[in-house]
Structures are given as C-alpha cells and as structure tokens.
Amino acid sequence: MKRILIIGATSAMAKGCARAMAEQGHSLFLCARKMAEIEELKHDLLARGAGSVSAMTLDINNLSRHKAVLETAYQELDGLDLVLLAHGTLPNQQQCEQNVDKTIEALQTNAVSSIAFLTRVANQFEQWGQGTIAAISSVAGDRGRQSNYVYGAAKNCLTTYLQGLRNRLDKAGVRVVTIKPGLVISPMTADFEKGPLWASADDVGRRMARVLLEGKQDVVYLPGFWRWIMMAICMIPETIFKRMSLG
Ligand SMILES: NC(=O)c1ccc[n+]([C@@H]2O[C@H](COP(=O)([O-])OP(=O)(O)OC[C@H]3O[C@@H](n4cnc5c(N)ncnc54)[C@H](OP(=O)(O)O)[C@@H]3O)[C@@H](O)[C@H]2O)c1
C-alpha cells in the first residue's frame, strides 16, 4: 500500500489517477483550492476502496504553506511514498503578450510553485533514500509555438528541472517521473474544438497511475503516440518551423 500526496488533486487528470489508485487500496492525501470539490472526491475515493483519504486546501502559489502541507501529509499518511503535482493553468497567450503580470503569473503557477514545492520534497526523499516524485508537464514544453509559448516556456522549465532532479536523485534511490500529456479533454481545454487526437482525462489519469505504481519509465507521453508526434515536430529545422503556425 502506497502513501500518496496529490497537489492539484481536483484536476480532471488527477481525479482519474486518484480513482485508479483508490481502487488498488492506496492511501491518499489530497490538496486543492476548493474544499467542497475535495470533499466530494474524498467520498468517491473511499467508496472505491482507498486505504484512507485525507485532505487540506492549498493554493500552490502560497509558498509559505508548502512546509506545513508536507508535514501534515506525512503525519496523516504515516509516511510518504509518492508525490504527484497535477495543478496548472492555461494562460491566454494574447493577454500574456500584452501584460507582463499575466506572463509572470503563468510562470509562477506552472513552474515556480512546482519547483519550490519539489525542492522540499526532493531533500526529504533524498534523506530517506526512497520515494517517487512526479509532475505533469506537457508536450507544449517540447517546442515553443506562437499559440502558447508562455505556457510552453513554463512547462519546459518544469521539464528541465525534473530532468536535473532525476539526474541528482537517481543515486539516492528516488524516482523522478515527468508526465507529458498531449491534448486532453478537461476544464482547462473546455473552449477548444476537439478532434481525433484528444483523450479523456479519466483515461490519461488512469494510465498515469499505472506508470507511477507499476512502471519504471522516467519520461512518459500520454497517450504514448505523442512521443512520435513530438519527435517529428522537434526535428523540423528552426528556419522552417519559425514560418509555420501549428495550433
Ligand atoms: N488538458 C490538457 O490538454 C493538458 C495537456 C498537457 C498538460 N496538461 C496539464 O495537466 C495538468 C492537469 O490539468 P487538467 O487538464 O486536468 O486541467 P484541470 O482539470 O483544469 O485542472 C487544473 C487544476 O489545477 C488547479 N490549480 C490551478 N491553479 C492552482 C493553484 N494556484 N493552486 C492549486 N491548484 C491550482 C485547478 O484548481 P481550481 O479548480 O481551484 O482552479 C485545477 O484543479 C496541468 O498541469 C496541465 O497544465 C493539460
């Protein structure tokens, strides 16, 4: 039975992941901004067979609360095996281009807050010599595009941070997993026109749980075909790519 902390636990993908984890009897500590939604999720997870479910509210941008959240999760779960960061926002690219504050806010929520939280988790897990750290980055971080490069830059920053962390913590026996979803149907993408490349958040979340609990991978594209799409996109020479307008 694993003891799991999820930040951004009410995200559509995190819910799918938590449901799969609960069905295997694992114990969960949920953090999100909306208590009513956390409570609803908590009941659902207990009904599915979770070993235990406890929760507390957290705005991840409130960095001064990170230490207390980690300590409380540790106490409630009687230890900690896995930490998953699933929070995120998709900023309006055009607004970011016109407004520095919006750009900084997007970088803060999607990169800085995660790095701040994981700095604490990493030191703790390194000291214990065990644990799994996972965070949801994005295929958007693999190559900057005019349609969402502020979000992409934040996710790229997170991806690079996780890569370095993995390189540091491998020798301590700590696993660091980077999850890169493609196009996923969730509240974040509610306004987007959907097509054949889109996956359901529940399905992606459940695949994520399998990777974290049973897999050995370091970097995971979800669904897996995004690895090949992004490989092809990254191979396009910059002189050509700069003239293209991918959505
Ligand atoms: N959907 C996609 O196509 C896609 C693709 C690649 C990667 N991703 C990434 O996948 C992750 C999950 O997103 P999703 O698609 O499942 O969307 P979602 O359902 O909209 O989830 C986003 C979650 O982030 C939380 N959040 C935002 N700001 C926060 C803050 N300051 N403190 C705490 N929680 C905060 C939101 O909480 P509130 O409800 O309180 O706002 C919400 O629960 C995100 O990291 C996203 O960037 C999504």
Image (cartoon, rainbow, N blue to C red):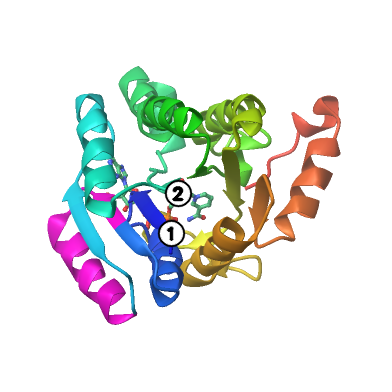
Tell me if 91 is positioned left or right of 31 in this view: right
Considering the image in quadrants, where does the N terminus appear? bottom left
Q: Which of marks 2 and 1 is in front?
A: 1
Amino acid type for the residue under numbered disc 2: Leu
Does residue 52 lie above or below 112 as drawn?
Answer: below
**Residue at mark 1:** 2
Range covered by the magenta-colored residues: 29-48
Expressed as whole percent of the image width and height from the top left, the position of residue 173 reads 60, 37
Residue displayed at 26% across by 31% down: 66
Residue displayed at 42% across by 31% down: 118
Under tag 1, what secondary structure? Answer: loop
Can you tell which mark lies on residue 82?
2
Q: Is residue 37 magenta?
A: yes
In which image quadrant can residue 113 be found?
A: top left
Label 2, residues with CA under 10 Å away: few <14, some 14-19, many ≥20: many
Q: Main secondary structure of the magenta part?
A: helix
